[in-house]
C-alpha cells in the first residue's frame, strides 16, 4: 500500500514539472506550446552535445542547455505564437503553428540523430533510494524534489515580486496591463522562456535516466497534460496536485489491475475532472457575466 | 505642448468607424467628447491610447508622432487611458492596482505621481479603508475612484477618460467629476472627458467636441456647444 | 476564459498529445536491366519514421555484402529503394512504386511485420519472389502459402515463441515455474501472450501476463504484480531496448530478481547504454545464431571496419546477408531474375545457403519458406558480461540451458 503511495507521488513529480511548462504560459498568454515534448528533446540533445562534444562539465552543460532551450521558447513565442494569437481569445492559430513546430523538431532530430534512444551519459543519480521505507530510483526522487522546489519558487516570485505582479496583471487583463506601461508581449515571452527552461530541465533529467531520443516527449505528454488538466491550467499549484493525483491513481489502479488499466484510469480521472470541474481542481472558477 | 489627432480614421476589421477626426488637447485643460451610444467614443479613446491601430492620420503628443507606438509605450510617455468599464485588476487589491498604475510613471516622475495619489486619496478617503481589499469586491463608485487614482499614479500628461460616469448614480457622477476637475488642476494633465452625460461634462470642460456616427459634427468652447440648438435637443433632452 | 473553453483546451491537449506524424513513401534510384544472370530487387524500408534503423541496417548489409555475393555467383544485382515511412500506408505506396515504376524482379522487405502485411497481397498478385529478411510475425506474414512466394531468413515469431517457451517453461529445481511475460500493448504483444497462455495450458504451467505501453516512464506497478504472483521465470517481450531498460530498472527498484529472465534479441539495441551491469546480470536472450560464432565475427568485423561500431540490429544484417546469398544463387540457377517462377523454384530447391563459413543445408523447400527451424539444439542463449559496455557472451545452446541450466 505504502509503496503505491510513494511511487505514485514520486512519478507524479516528473509530470508536474513538465505540466508547469504549459500552465505558466497558459496563465500569462492563454496559449501553450504544443511542441513541449519536443522541447524536452531539444534540451536533452543540447545537454548531450554540450557535454559529449563541447566538453562542458555535466552541471554546466545542463545549465547552458536549459538556458538555450528557454531562449528557443521565447523565440517560439515571438515567431509562432504571438503573431497567431492576435485576434482575441477565439484565435487559436497558435495551436496549429506549435503542433507544426513539434513535427518539424521530431523530423529534424530524427534525421540528425536517428530514432534510437541514446544514453545521455551524465546527470543520472544512478542509485535506488529509500523513501518512507519504499524503494524509488534516485532520479525520480530528484525530479520530484525539483518539481516541488520549482513550484514553490514560482509561487513566491509570482506572489511577492513586482515581476510577479505584472504577470498576474497580464493573466487577468493583458490589454489593461498594456495601459499601465507594461508590455504583455514581454511578459509572455518571459513566461515562455521560463516555461521552456523548466521543460528543458525536466527533459534532461528524465533523459539522464532513460536516454535521449526524438520520441522522448510523447509518452510523457499524456501524463503531463493530464496532470495539468486535473490540477487546473490556471493555478501554479495545479501541476503539483494534478501530478500527485495522476501518479497515485495510475500507480494504485496499475498495481491492482495491470499497468494499462493504470493509464486508462488516469485518463478517466481527467475526463471526470473535465466534466465536473473543467477549470481543474485548483483552477479559477469563472464567474459567468451577464 | 499638445496632444493632436489629425485626420484619424480607425475601426475594426475592414469597416471604418471613425473618419476625419481632428482633435486637440492641451495640458491642464478639460476637453469633452460627447456622443450617443455607438457614436465611436470608445473607438476614439482606444485609438488614441494605442489599443487600436489607426488606418489613416496622425497622432502627435508633444511634438512626437506616436501613432506607431505600442499602447505600453504611449502609457510610459504619459498618454494614459482609463478604459470604459474601468477594467480594474479585480483579483488584486486596491493597493496593488494603484501600485501597478505607477509602473507607467516609473521612468518619468514617480515621486510627483505618489504625491498626486496621496492628494487624491485625501480627497476620497474611503479608498484608504479599502486599501487591502480585492478591487473586484468594491462598489462601482469606489472602483471608479480606484481607476482614477491608478491613472494618476501613472503621472498622466494626457488623460483619456472613457465614460467615467458609466453605471454611477447622479450623486456619484458629481463626485467623479469633482475629482476630474481636481486632477486637471493639480496634475496639470490635459483631460479628454468622453461622456454621454453631456450636461455635467460640458459644465466642467473648457472645450467640447460632438461625435456622431464616427465624425465630429460640432466643436467649440463648451458653453457654445452646450447652447447650440442641435446639441440641446440631441443630448441634453431640452 | 470560460470553463467551457478550458474544457475544450483540455480535450485538445489530449487529442494532440496522442496524434502522430505520418511520412510518405518515395522511391529512389532507378534500375538498369539487361543481361542474363541479372535481377532487380526492390528494397522497401522505413527510411523515415520511428524505426529508421531497419532501413539503415538493411542498406548497409547490401552495400557490404552484395558485391561479394555477386562476384561469388557471377550474377548482377541491382537495388532500388523505396521508403515506407514506417507506416502501413507508406508501405502500400512504396510497393506500388517498386512494382509499377521500377518493375522489380523481387521485393525485399518491408522489415517490419505490420508494413509487410500491408504489401503481402500486392506482392502475391504480382507473383514475384518476396524476400523477408526481417519481418518475423508468422501469423501476419506467413511464408510458402499459395498466395505468395515468400522466403524468410529471419527467424519467425512462432519459432521464437516455441523455443523461448521450451526454455522458459522448463522446470526450476524440479518444479514447474510460474512464467511471467511482459508484452507490449499492441497486436504483436497480444499474440505473444496468447502463445504463452496456450503453451502454459498445454503444459499445466501458470502464466502471468503484464502489458506495457511502449515508452512508459516506469513499470513499477507491473513489476509489483509479477512479483506478487510469484513469477520465477520471466520473459520481457518488448521490441525496444529502451523499454527493456525501463523494465529492468523497475525490477531493480522493486528488488525483483526471478531465477530466469529472458528478453527478445532487441535487447541488443540501445539497452546497454541505458541500463547498468547490475541490471543485466542474469538477463539472457536467444537467437538462432551464435553472435560469438565465426560467421558473426566475420560479419561484425567487416561491418565495423566499414561503418565504425556495431550494428543496431545484428540480426537484420546477418539475415540480409543470408537472403542475398539465397537469391543470388536462385537467379544464377534460373538464368535471369525476370523469370520469376523459375527463381522461386530455384529458391525452393537450393542445396544450401552460406553465410561466411556457415551453411544451411536444404534451407527451403516446396511448402517451406523458413530458413530457421524451432529446434532448441540449433538456437543459442546469450547474455552480457559485467563490463560497462556489456560484451555479448554465449552461454550455450538453448538445449544445453534447458538440460543443465545457464
Ligand atoms: N470590437 C469591435 N468590433 C467591431 N465593431 C465594434 C467593436 N467595438 C465597437 N464596435 C462598433 O463600433 C461602433 C462604435 O462603437 P464604440 O464602442 O466606439 O461606441 P461608443 O460611442 O463608445 O458607444 P457607448 O456609448 O455605447 O460606449 C459601434 O457601431 C460598435 O458596434
Ligand atoms: Mg463606449
Image: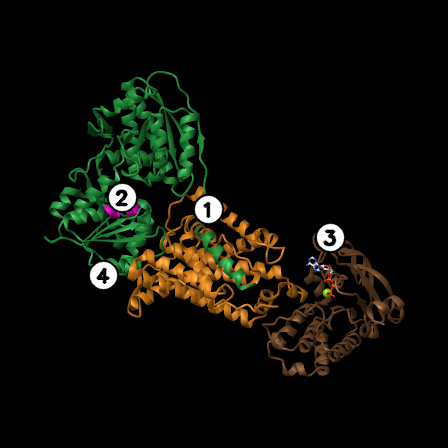
Give the camera-side residue of C226 and B13.
B13
Q: In which quarter of the image is the C terminus of chain A?
A: bottom right
Residue at which label 2 appears: C265
Tell me where the magenta segment starts and ends, as one range.
C188-194
The picture places residue C84, in percent across and down from the top left corner, at 41, 36
Asked whether mark 3 lies closer than 8 Å to ligand 1, one says yes
Residue at which label 3 appears: B15
Asked whether mark 4 lies closer than 8 Å to ligand 1, one says no
Circle number at residue C354:
none
Spot the brown chain and give its letter: B
- Which mark is in front, 2 or 3? 3
Give the camera-side residue of B63 and C182.
C182
Residue drawn at x 23%, y 59% as measured from the top left: C227
Within 10 Å of disc 3 (Cα), the crowding (few <14, some 14-19, many 20+) is: few
Chain letter for the residue marked with disc 4 in the picture: C
Residue at which label 4 appears: C228
Chain letter for the residue marked with disc 3 in the picture: B
Spot the orange chain and give its letter: A
Dot 2: element: helix
Whether residue A150 appears in this view of the structure is: no
Circle number at residue A106:
1
- Which mark is in front, 4 or 3? 3
Image hue for chain C: green
Amino acid at each position: 500500500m505504502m509503496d503505491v503511495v510513494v511511487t505514485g507521488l514520486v512519478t507524479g513529480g516528473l509530470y508536474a514539472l513538465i505540466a508547469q511548462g504549459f500552465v505558466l504560459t497558459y496563465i500569462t498568454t492563454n496559449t501553450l506550446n504544443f511542441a513541449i515534448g519536443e522541447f524536452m528533446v531539444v534540451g536533452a540533445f543540447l545537454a548531450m552535445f554540450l557535454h559529449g562534444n563541447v566538453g562542458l562539465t555535466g552541471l554546466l552543460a545542463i545549465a547552458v542547455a536549459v538556458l538555450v532551450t528557454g531562449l528557443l521558447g521565447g523565440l517560439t513565442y515571438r515567431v509562432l505564437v504571438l503573431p497567431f494569437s492576435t485576434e482575441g481569445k477565439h484565435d487559436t492559430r497558435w495551436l496549429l503553428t506549435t503542433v507544426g513546430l513539434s513535427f518539424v523538431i521530431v523530423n529534424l532530430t530524427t534525421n540528425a540523430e536517428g530514432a534510437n534512444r541514446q544514453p545521455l551519459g551524465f546527470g543520472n543519480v544512478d542509485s535506488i533510494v529509500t523513501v518512507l521505507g519504499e524503494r524509488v530510483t534516485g532520479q525520480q526522487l530528484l525530479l520530484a524534489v525539483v518539481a516541488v522546489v520549482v513550484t514553490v519558487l514560482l509561487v513566491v516570485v509570482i506572489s511577492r515580486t513586482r515581476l510577479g505582479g505584472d504577470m498576474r496583471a497580464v493573466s487577468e487583463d493583458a490589454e489593461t496591463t498594456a495601459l499601465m506601461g507594461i508590455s504583455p508581449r514581454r511578459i509572455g515571452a518571459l513566461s515562455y522562456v521560463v516555461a521552456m527552461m523548466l521543460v528543458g530541465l525536466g527533459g534532461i533529467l528524465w533523459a539522464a535516466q532513460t536516454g535521449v531520443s526524438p520520441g522522448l516527449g510523447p509518452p510523457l505528454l499524456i501524463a503531463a497534460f493530464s496532470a495539468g488538466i486535473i490540477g487546473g491550467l490556471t493555478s501554479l499549484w495545479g501541476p503539483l496536485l494534478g501530478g500527485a493525483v495522476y501518479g497515485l491513481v495510475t500507480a494504485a489502479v496499475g498495481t491492482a489491475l495491470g499497468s494499462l488499466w493504470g493509464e486508462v484510469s488516469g485518463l478517466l480521472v481527467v475526463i471526470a475532472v473535465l466534466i465536473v470541474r473543467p477549470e481543474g481542481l485548483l483552477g479559477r472558477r469563472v464567474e459567468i457575466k451577464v | 505642448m499638445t496632444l493632436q489627432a489629425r485626420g484619424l480614421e480607425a475601426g475594426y476589421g475592414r469597416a471604418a468607424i471613425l473618419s476625419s477626426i481632428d482633435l486637440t488637447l492641451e495640458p491642464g485643460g478639460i476637453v469633452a467628447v460627447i456622443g450617443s451610444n455607438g457614436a465611436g467614443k470608445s473607438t476614439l479613446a482606444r485609438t488614441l491610447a494605442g489599443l487600436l491601430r489607426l488606418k489613416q492620420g496622425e497622432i502627435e503628443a508633444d511634438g512626437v508622432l506616436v501613432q506607431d507606438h505600442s499602447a505600453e509605450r504611449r502609457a510610459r510617455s504619459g498618454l494614459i487611458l482609463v478604459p470604459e468599464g474601468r477594467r480594474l485588476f479585480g483579483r488584486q487589491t486596491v493597493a496593488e492596482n494603484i501600485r501597478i498604475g505607477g509602473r507607467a510613471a516609473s521612468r518619468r516622475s514617480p515621486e510627483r505621481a505618489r504625491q498626486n495619489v496621496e492628494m487624491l486619496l485625501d480627497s476620497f478617503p474611503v479608498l484608504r479603508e479599502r486599501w487591502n481589499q480585492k478591487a473586484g469586491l468594491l462598489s462601482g463608485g469606489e472602483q471608479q475612484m480606484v481607476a482614477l487614482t491608478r491613472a494618476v499614479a501613472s503621472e498622466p500628461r494626457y488623460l483619456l477618460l472613457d465614460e467615467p460616469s458609466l453605471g454611477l448614480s447622479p450623486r456619484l457622477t458629481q463626485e467623479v467629476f469633482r475629482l476630474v476637475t481636481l486632477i486637471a488642476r493639480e496634475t496639470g494633465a490635459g483631460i479628454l472627458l468622453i461622456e454621454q452625460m453631456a450636461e455635467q461634462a460640458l459644465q466642467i470642460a473648457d472645450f467640447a467636441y460632438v461625435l456622431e456616427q464616427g465624425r465630429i459634427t460640432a466643436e467649440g468652447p463648451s458653453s457654445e456647444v452646450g447652447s447650440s440648438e442641435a446639441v440641446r435637443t440631441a443630448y441634453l433632452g431640452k | 476564459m470560460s470553463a467551457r473553453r478550458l474544457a475544450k483546451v483540455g480535450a485538445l491537449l489530449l487529442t494532440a498529445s496522442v496524434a502522430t506524424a505520418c511520412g510518405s513513401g518515395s522511391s529512389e534510384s532507378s534500375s538498369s536491366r539487361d543481361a542474363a544472370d541479372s535481377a532487380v530487387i526492390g528494397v522497401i524500408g522505413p527510411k523515415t519514421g520511428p524505426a529508421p534503423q531497419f532501413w539503415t541496417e538493411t542498406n548497409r548489409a547490401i552495400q557490404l555484402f552484395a558485391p561479394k555475393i555477386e562476384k561469388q555467383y557471377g550474377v548482377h544485382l541491382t537495388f532500388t529503394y523505396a521508403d515506407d515511412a514506417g507506416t502501413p500506408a507508406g508501405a502500400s505506396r512504396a510497393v506500388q512504386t517498386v512494382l509499377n515504376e521500377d518493375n522489380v524482379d523481387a521485393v525485399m522487405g518491408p522489415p517490419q511485420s505490420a508494413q509487410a502485411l500491408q504489401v503481402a497481397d500486392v506482392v502475391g498478385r504480382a507473383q514475384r519472389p518476396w524476400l523477408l529478411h526481417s519481418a518475423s510475425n508468422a501469423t501476419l506474414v506467413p511464408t510458402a502459402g499459395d498466395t505468395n512466394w515468400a522466403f524468410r531468413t529471419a527467424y519467425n515469431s512462432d519459432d521464437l515463441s516455441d523455443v523461448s517457451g521450451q526454455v522458459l517453461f522448463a522446470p526450476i529445481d524440479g518444479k514447474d515455474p510460474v512464467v511471467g511475460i511482459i508484452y507490449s500493448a499492441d497486436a504483436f504483444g497480444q499474440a505473444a501472450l496468447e502463445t504463452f497462455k496456450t503453451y502454459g495450458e498445454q503444459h499445466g504451467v501458470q502464466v502471468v501476463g503484464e502489458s506495457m505501453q511502449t515508452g512508459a516512464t516506469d513499470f513499477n506497478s507491473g513489476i509489483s504484480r509479477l512479483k506478487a504472483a510469484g513469477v520465477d521465470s520471466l520473459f520481457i517481450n518488448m521490441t525496444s531496448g529502451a523499454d527493456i531498460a525501463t523494465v529492468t530498472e523497475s525490477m531493480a527498484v522493486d528488488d525483483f530478481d526471478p531465477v530466469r529472465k529472458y528478453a527478445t534479441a532487441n535487447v541488443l539495441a540501445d539497452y546497454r547504454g541505458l541500463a547498468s551491469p547490475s541490471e543485466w546480470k542474469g538477463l539472457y536472450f536467444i537467437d538462432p545464431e551464435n553472435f560469438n560464432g565465426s560467421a558473426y565475427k566475420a560479419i561484425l568485423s567487416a561491418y565495423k571496419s566499414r561503418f565504425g561500431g556495431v550494428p543496431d540490429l545484428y540480426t537484420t544484417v546477418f539475415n540480409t546477408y543470408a537472403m542475398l546469398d539465397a537469391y543470388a544463387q536462385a537467379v544464377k540457377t534460373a538464368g535471369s531474375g525476370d523469370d520469376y517462377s523459375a527463381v522461386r523454384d530455384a529458391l525452393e530447391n537450393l542445396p544450401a545457403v552460406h553465410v561466411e563459413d556457415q551453411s544451411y543445408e536444404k534451407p527451403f523447400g516446396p511448402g517451406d519458406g523458413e530458413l530457421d527451424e524451432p529446434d532448441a539444439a540449433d538456437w543459442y542463449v546469450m547474455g552480457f558480461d559485467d563490463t560497462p559496455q556489456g560484451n555479448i557472451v554465449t552461454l550455450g545452446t538453448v538445449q544445453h540451458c534447458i538440460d543443465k541450466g545457464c
